[in-house]
């Protein structure tokens, strides 16, 4: 029996997310190297990632709509070229405004074609195993976060941060464009059904689900967006400021970069285990649990000073972060169907994800004002408690059944 093509889509999404997110979460490594050279404030350079987070989440909406309209292959390939070119161009930076343009805007547009098209495409290929498939695909992002930051630190040490940016940019461009052709739009386009069921005697029915125009008229849509906004406001704080925090505590550059890898290891476990769990106990309770775990992790960051405590806290944060980001597209598909999954995931990703822009900027400003990240971590924990409460109040709307073609 031939392998269901959906699993090839999962494998391709794994590689794209490994490459794109692994490169993205090397920012903290480059952040420290750039700070050492230019002596800019943490708030000013942290603002680059804040603009990046805003821009890449906003670009997720057009990327999702284009993925629905054109298919994910062209969208992902174009994004890989943009992201890789922008990262290589970071080697030319000499003034503060330049990373705002090159990384904060151009790289963000390229990155916006990774998460939404990959995840919304996986959602279309699976129903019963949606959580498991999304979890396996998104382990790519976790594996990239685990593997690439230490490699980035070694590259910075050997080549300088400018040379390392060129190498990483070229690798992103080449790998993403090699893999993108495997990303097929949906099972219906290949005469299949989600999860691999084939109906030889009849064409698959059209995909069921609410269009974006109908979904935005439901309370569930906005409540789900509010819950994700609350959990994503602080989500990038550790991923941007963890390396500088570890350096402040007296740890070596490589040990500090490895703290980001601990986040990736936790996210890898969260995505693998909790995607499968969510298929059995439900997406909403799994997500609420993960938001509470994330609140605990943010609180623990205020007291983590030695390397074992720092790595353990980063691991727990990564576990919750990985679960929440992985199941986002799946719960959108559960609530609203997958007929316009790219547009729905993209719109909510734009709405909720763009709030993550404020986290690194605010944390940098708090540090510059107080000399500590403690207040930022306490606020982050509070946002996750709010997110769990909002999600607990959210219920899916009724979706009309799709009719088979005559």
Image: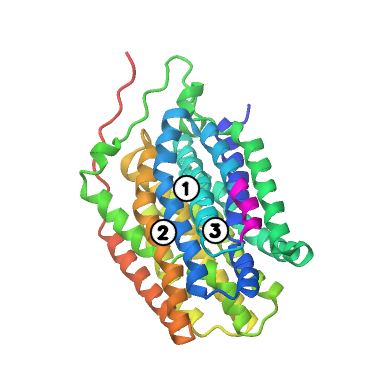
Q: Is residue 262 visible?
A: no
Task: Find numbered disc 2 in the image and state the secondary structure of the residue it sits on.
Answer: helix
Q: CA distance from mark 3 to mark 2?
A: 41 Å
Q: CA distance from mark 3 to mark 1?
A: 40 Å
Q: Is residue 27 visible?
A: yes
Residue for point 73% across, 64% down: 160
Is residue 88 a member of the stretch shown in magenta?
yes
Q: Which of marks 1 and 3 precedes in the sequence?
A: 3
Toward which corner of the image does residue 78 lie, by quadrant?
A: top right
For the image, the number of numbered tags is 3
Q: Magenta-highlighted stretch: main secondary structure?
A: helix
Q: Quadrant of the N terminus?
A: top right
Q: Identify the residue position indicated by label 1 in the image.
A: 131
Q: Quadrant of the C terminus?
A: top left
- Direction from residue 311 to residue 299 in the image, left or right: left
Q: Which residues are magenta?
A: 84-93
| Of 11 and 286, the residue lying toward us | 11
Q: Identify the residue position indicated by label 2 in the image.
A: 286
């Amino acid at each position: 029996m031939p392998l269901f093509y959906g699993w090839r889509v999962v494998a391709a999404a794994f590689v794209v997310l490994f490459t794109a997110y692994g490169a993205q979460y090397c920012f903290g490594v480059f952040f420290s190297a750039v700070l050492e050279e230019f002596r800019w404030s943490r708030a000013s350079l942290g603002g680059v990632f804040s603009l990046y987070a805003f821009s890449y989440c906003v670009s997720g909406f057009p990327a999702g709509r284009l993925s629905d309209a054109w298919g994910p292959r062209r969208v992902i390939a174009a994004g890989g070229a943009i992201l890789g070119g922008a990262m290589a161009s970071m080697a030319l930076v000499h003034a503060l405004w330049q990373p705002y343009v090159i990384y904060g805007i151009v790289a963000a547009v390229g990155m916006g074609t990774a998460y939404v098209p990959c995840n919304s495409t996986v959602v279309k290929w699976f129903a019963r195993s949606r959580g498991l498939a999304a979890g396996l695909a998104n382990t790519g992002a976790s594996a990239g976060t685990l593997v690439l930051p230490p490699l980035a630190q070694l590259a910075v040490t050997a080549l300088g941060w400018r040379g390392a940016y060129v190498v990483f940019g070229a690798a992103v461009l080449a790998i993403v464009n090699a893999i993108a052709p495997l990303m097929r739009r949906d099972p219906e386009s290949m005469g299949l059904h989600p999860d691999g069921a084939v109906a030889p005697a009849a064409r698959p029915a059209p995909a069921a689900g609410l269009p974006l125009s109908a979904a935005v008229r439901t309370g569930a849509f906005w409540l789900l967006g509010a819950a994700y906004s609350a959990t994503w406001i602080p989500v990038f704080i550790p991923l941007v400021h963890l390396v500088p925090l570890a350096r402040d505590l007296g740890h070596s550059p490589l040990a500090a970069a490895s703290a980001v890898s601990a986040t990736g290891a936790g996210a890898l476990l969260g995505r693998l285990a909790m995607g499968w769990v969510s298929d059995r106990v439900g997406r909403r309770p799994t997500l609420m649990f993960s938001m509470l775990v994330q609140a605990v992790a943010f609180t623990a960051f205020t007291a983590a000073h030695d390397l074992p405590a720092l790595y353990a806290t980063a691991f727990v944060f990564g576990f919750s972060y990985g679960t929440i980001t992985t199941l986002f597209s799946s719960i959108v598909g559960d609530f609203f169907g997958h007929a316009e999954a790219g547009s729905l995931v993209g719109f909510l990703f734009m709405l909720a994800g763009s709030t993550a822009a404020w986290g690194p900027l605010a944390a940098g400003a708090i540090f510059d004002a107080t000399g500590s990240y403690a207040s930022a971590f306490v606020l982050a924990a509070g946002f996750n408690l709010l997110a769990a409460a909002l999600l607990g109040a959210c219920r899916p709307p009724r979706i009309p059944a799709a009719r088979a073609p005559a």
